[in-house]
Amino acid sequence: ILSAMSSELRPVRRALGLDDRPQAGSSYARGMYKGVTVITAVTRMGLAAAQSATEELFANAGSDIDHVFVVGIAGANDPGLKIGEVVIPLSVVDERDGIFRYPDNLSDFESSGLIYSTDQLAYSKDFVAMLQDRKVSLVDMESGAIAAVCERHNCPFTIIRAVSDRVDKHAENFDVFHLANDDGSPNFLAAIRYILRKPWKIVYLISLGLGAKKAIDASSAELLRNIECLLSRE
């Protein structure tokens, strides 16, 4: 089970009764759930980090991996999606190669839409127009890279994202990525400086935090349903 941020994995680990402390010399945490070994890891944010972490996963435990789950939050480009709404995509694209890859859906939740994975931090009018032209549902920074690695290793994967904010033409200028460290933990000094420069953005930051919490709860709940569906097939 892979997430970009520790906050995205925390409720999953808690629900499955898993230790969140990596073993010595490893970036992964292992645990048992209903007799099955579960490996969880924080990839950190971005395509390169996600790719590297997933490659490390297969290098260390490849022969033991039956399925990879990606869980967490994403920004909505589809205006019909609401904050906290879950998406299990029909396809996902890593912007670096532009290849469509197709996740498995293990539950009765209906798959829909396209996730576009990018390292873009500033959503210009041209970038948003491209997203709309391609009918992108969600934008994230990891799923496409993880999917590419899974494909190379012939491993099935499932992506479960929930909407935390908007990236479409209705979104505010999204200039807050630097307020978090690359594992998603808050960079308090950067946040203080940001608020001092732009005090009118406090409401915006609070809304982002609330949206992220709602999305994490929703994506975690759907992940747990998918895990139970996978286990029932064994």
Image (spheres, rainbow, N blue to C red):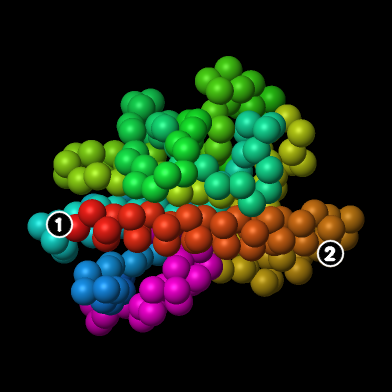
Which mark sits nearer the N-terminus, 1 or 2?
1
SS of the residue under disc 2:
helix
SS of the residue under disc 1:
helix
Q: Give residue 101's position: percent from left, percent from top.
A: 33, 32
- What crowding class fits label 1: few (fewer than 14 Cα within 10 Å), some (14-19), or many (20 or more)? some
Mark 2 is on which residue type? Leu
Q: Which residues are magenta?
A: 1-25
Q: Given this view, does label 1 or label 2 mark the residue nearer the observer?
A: 1
Q: Residue at x 70, y 61 (%)?
A: 209
Q: Give residue 92's position: percent from left, percent from top.
A: 41, 34
64 and 41: which is toward the camera: 64
Q: Quadrant of residue 90?
A: top left
Q: Which mark is residue 196?
A: 2
Distance from disc 1 to disc 2, alpha carbons, whole Å, reads 47 Å
Q: Residue at x 13, y 61 (%)?
A: 64
Residue 5 in the image: above or below residue 127: below
Q: From the viewer's perspective, is 131 left or right of 195?
A: left
The answer to whether residue 203 of the structure is visible from this angle is yes
Q: From the viewer's perspective, is 68 left or right of 193?
A: left
Q: Which residue is mark 1?
A: 62
Q: From the viewer's perspective, is 138 left or right of 231?
A: right
Q: Give residue 26's position: percent from left, percent from top.
A: 25, 73
Quadrant of the image containing the C terminus: bottom left
Q: From the viewer's perspective, is 155 left or right of 41?
A: left
Quadrant of the image containing the N terminus: bottom left
50 and 121: which is toward the camera: 50
Mark 1 is on which residue type? Gly
The answer to whether residue 58 of the structure is visible from this angle is no
Q: Residue at x 77, y 41 (%)?
A: 172
